[in-house]
Amino acid sequence: MSRLTTYREHVGAILTLGLPLIGSHVAQFLVQVADTLMLGWYDVEVLAGEVLGSTLFFILFIAGSGFAWALTPLVAEAEGRGDTITARRATRMSLWITGLYALAALPLLLLAEPLMIALGQDPALAAIAGEYLSIYGWGIFPALGVMVLKSHLSALERTRVVMWVTLLAVLVNALGNHVFIFGHWGAPEMGVRGAALASLLVQLTSLAGLVIYVQRATPETALFRRFWKPDWEAFGAVFRLGWPIGVTTLTEVGLFAAATFMMGWIGILDLAAHGIALQIVSLTFMIHVGLANTATIRAGRAIGRRDTAGLRDGALAAVALSAAAVLLTVVIFLAVPGWLIGLFLSPEEPDRAQVIAIGRHLIAAAALFQLVDATQVMALGLLRGAKDTRVPMVYAVIAYWAVGLPCAYGLGFVAGWGGVGIWLGLAAGLAVAAVTMMARFWRVILPRAAAGPAA
């Protein structure tokens, strides 16, 4: 079989598995985009406050998601060996760990207002963020449960149901926002609290849908039977693999959160433009997250089969697909940035023109770091498939906090470039992460896999 034929087979397999994953990630993010879009039409100041609240929620959520993402390589490799028992044990304990984490994170979410004030945010915006999280903060429990079950089903290559459940969540969220933010159909006008209530309903609906599916469609897994019984060996395996993933992701998300707080120091309109631009960029980034998740699954299964050639060729195919997606999104960002920003603002909004003007520059800066952002998440996906999480964690801390954060502050405030400087600083951190992590996969992990388990 020729190498070209091999690559075509890998591309086909990646797309078959990955397109539903990409769809589910895009749909999941559309929940947040809908909040931004509808609140932008409701009131720009309310939108800015929601940006602060959702940023705090996302930071804590993403840190806990490491224990869910740890399932993907654990379950994929176990299934590659035909070991369904290990896959079941790991999933149960992942639910345990994320539940305990959510319990610890909840007080921070409920104390959002004083926390935001301590971080130097405008008191009015901090109050809005506190209102939002007084309701949606409770969503950390179902949100993490959803992540665990999505990771479990994705590793089993049951990605279509993940996509359909997430699409249902988008519809529930849009309907809930329509009713509760603006007070339609006899409901009270709740503004930011309405957006929070709709998002909470989304998480509960998604969790219920996935639990019902697992119970009915995969009874052989017996996932919830004797759920209360501890399994400390599996607990330890998930924890050891998951906490570096959580820290790695937290360092990147924390960098973007720091950028959000720095934009808040500049002004309300800059923060609103930043929130809109970040939603647009993050939406296209979900394509690369889906491809990276697919790379994790296929890398884990290849390692479980001890198929080094499959690991190498599959990685090349995944990287090529990600690069093609980058090219497409960069063209869109550079062609119609103002139109994209304008979608999130009411035509009657008095500050519409100024927010669009700020956002246009941020979208242009984002086009520059699409390549490095996609490269670093793909490298992480491949490394996680090989269960290599601790060294990438160190790379991430250095790249994002020793390089990215100082560059963002220096370019934004010292050099006086404002929001564009902050975003270019983000790009610098992402570039360092992309180079170091991708080099580790090709120069360390792949040769190690080729050398065999004794290496």
Image (cartoon, rainbow, N blue to C red):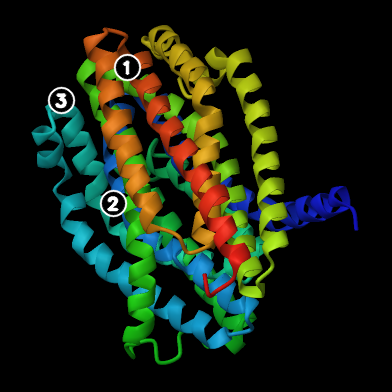
* Neighbourhood count class around disc 1 (C-alpha, 10 Å): few under 14, some 14–19, many 20 upward: many
Find residue 270 and report its horizontal and vertical position in percent: 32, 17
Find residue 371 and report its horizontal and vertical position in percent: 56, 30
217 lies above or below 24: below
Report if residue 175 is visible in the image: no
Q: Earlier in the sequence, mark 1 or mark 2?
A: 2
Report if residue 10 is visible in the image: yes
Q: Which residue is mark 1?
A: 270
* Neighbourhood count class around disc 2 (C-alpha, 10 Å): few under 14, some 14–19, many 20 upward: many
**Image side of residue 139 versus residue 33, left or right:** left
Q: Which residue is mark 3?
A: 122
Which residue is depicted at the point 48% across and 48% down?
173
Which residue is depicted at the point 48% across and 13% down?
360
**Viewer-proximal residue among 221 and 411:** 411
Q: How many tags in the picture?
A: 3
**Mark 1 or mark 2, which is nearer to you?**
2
Q: Which residue is mark 2?
A: 60
**Image side of residue 215 versus residue 160, left or right:** left
The residue tagged with tag 2: helix, strand or loop? helix
Which residue is depicted at the point 62% across and 72% down?
156
Q: Earlier in the sequence, mark 2 or mark 3?
A: 2
Q: Quadrant of the N terminus?
A: bottom right
Q: Earlier in the sequence, mark 3 or mark 1?
A: 3
Find residue 103 and report its horizontal and vertical position in percent: 22, 66
In the image, what residue type sits under mark 2? Leu
Which residue is depicted at the point 30% across and 22% down?
407
**Image side of residue 306 versus residue 238, left or right:** right
* Neighbourhood count class around disc 3 (C-alpha, 10 Å): few under 14, some 14–19, many 20 upward: some
